[in-house]
Image: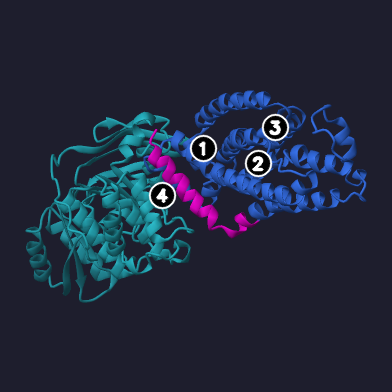
Amino acid sequence: MTSTVPPVTPVIENTHELVISATDLSKRFGNYQAISHVSMQVRRGQAFGLLGPNGAGKTTTVRLLNHVISPDNGEVLLFGEKMTAHRADRLRTRIGVQTDTNVYENLTARENLMFWARLYGLAPRQRKARVDEVLDMMGLAHRARAQAGSFSKGMRQKLAVGRAILHRPELLFLDEPTTGLDPQASAELISHLEDMVHSFNTTLVMCTHQLAGLADLCKDVGFLVGGRMEASGPVEQLVAERWPGHHVRISLGAESDELIARARTHIQNESAGISCEINADRTLHLELPDESFTEGVIASLVAAQFPIRSVVPVTYSIKDLYFDIASTTGEVAA
Amino acid sequence: MNIQRVLTVAHKDLIEVVRNKQAMFPMLVIPLGLAVMIPFGIIVMGSDPTMPTSAFGLSSLIDQLPKGILPPDLSESQKMVYAFTVYFMAPVFLLIPSMSATVIGSSSFVGEKERRTIEGLLYTPVTDRELVLAKIIASLVPAIVITWGSFGAYVFIVDTFASPVIGERYFPTANWYALMFLVVPLLAFLTVALIVAVSGRATSSQGAQGVSFLVVMPMILLTMGQTTGIMLFSTTVALVFAAVLVVVDVVVLYAVAGVFHRERLLTKLL
């Protein structure tokens, strides 16, 4: 992804400013409660991952935040202003949204972007340069004059993301932006988004259930399940709250059930404050108050002549958190 | 209201229409038949003194025209040609924009819903009123251009084949100018606005076209009757009618924008 136009000097200001502040949002469609009492806050320059299985309410939440649909209850503040029908159109000039891959098929890639550039009021002199820049950035420059109807799903995705970032929005909503992209294009897009967040202080809300590589970009996440925000906050904090202490997995030299059960009993008797469970793969899972307890536990097992094959620290990721929340709420994880 | 955004959306829609050959073909062929082929045939055959006017079923209509409306000293075949070209063809030019508008306008919103491009558009800064006006313009412009193009072709046909029969250039008459450049655009605007309103609430293009036909045709038929009966015989009446249409158009535009509902547009089909 190379740039043909010198980048605009980023203006970084007031990084603690709340760009999104949604309180107690609820939305019902007929008998279906799509969103229930959802609250969320996103600061300027923050990359926020809105996670959840299919039908969790991610798209509805984005629609509510942008006032494309109005909530039955609750309110949305964007850039400190209450989002109302009268203000929505002005506030939307500062927002970019990509929710799908649907572009105008009878228009060329360039025409699609020029259309968006005009709608967002880019000055005539800026339009061509910026459109060229985005086409290049998205790897579509060689197909600029081709009608979008002839594009593959991945190319449409790039075009849809390209039009969302075209006017350099302060707030960017992306819904599954890497779907349909090949690994290289996906990595380039994530890299570009990181650049937007870190260099240009763009606020990013990314809806996804594709968890690979998400933690590198989104340090803060919200888990929507069944229309409810089940958890929200920095990933590290959520993981620490869910799995406090230090976790290790111990594999014994022999895999007899009796030996493993004896080892578990030994640990529980000898080490206060340590939780020990037997995993399905016949390893022991230990939850320790902190890392310093590991050495003592190992020494105790060795002294009792338990054959230890390996001791591996267990780290929890955003993916573990996702599946844990999905399973505890009874939702089938995507 | 941001005119640039209105024109941007309308321009995009126009490009899409022009590139849609399936939509363009009937919009061009039907007016060609109505404004060129049929008049050409009737003028050529009607100007033949050996052909009785009753052959075209026009003699009784000619008899119903107000006295003194036709130029004096015309032969039967000249009367037929004059009456046909000046009076009986006028309703056709009210029908042409309505047909074109129905083809384009009925799919204005519902077409974007079906192609699932509407959601992206609704996230942009375009206001409801801008969006409605843009969709109306996008349907109105081709409807009027096609009608005026058909009118140009019709003028050529009349001048070339009917004027020699009458013995002088007599067309277009002053009332035709009022019809084409005042009544047609204003009536087309009203038609398009109603069709766009239907499109905004329909769940499929076919449904929108069906309902549009039901909504628009009675109005067109009524206006066509009034046109042949009164308007073309009096420039004053045509101007008054145009003035009334201006008021009705403005009221309808605000009403259509008022009933436009972003959320319904997005959630009804999707």
Please state, as top left, top right, bottom left or bottom right, where the N terminus of chain B lies in the image: top left
Label 2 to label 1: alpha-carbon separation = 27 Å
- SS state under label 4: loop
Q: Amino acid at mark 1?
A: Arg
Q: Residues within 10 Å of mark 3 (few under 14, many from 20)?
A: some
Residue B173, horizontal then vertical, whole percent: 68, 36
Q: Quadrant of residue A334?
A: bottom left
Question: Which secondary structure is most common in the magenta stretch?
Answer: helix
The shade of chain A is cyan
Question: Relative to the observer, which residue lies in front, A28 or A226?
Answer: A28
Q: Amino acid at mark 3?
A: Met
- SS state under label 2: helix
Asked if the residues shown at circle 4 and circle 2 are in contact, with their CB atoms under 8 angstroms apart, the answer is no
Tell me the subunit letter for badge 3: B
Identity of the residue drawn at 15% across and 49% down: A10
Label 4 to label 1: alpha-carbon separation = 31 Å
Q: How is the image coloured?
A: by chain
- The region drawn magenta spans B1-25
Residue, disc 1:
B264
Same chain under badges 4 and 3? The reply is: no
Same chain under badges 4 and 1? The reply is: no
Identity of the residue drawn at 35% across and 66% down: A181
Query: Does A52 appear above or below A182?
Result: above
Same chain under badges 3 and 1? The reply is: yes
- SS state under label 3: helix
Label 4 to label 2: alpha-carbon separation = 56 Å
Q: Which comes before the other along the chain, label 3 or label 1? A: 3
Q: Amino acid at mark 4?
A: Gly
Q: Amino acid at mark 2?
A: Ser
Residue, disc 4:
A330
Residue, disc 2:
B98
Horizontally, residue A294 falls left or right of residue A90, namely left
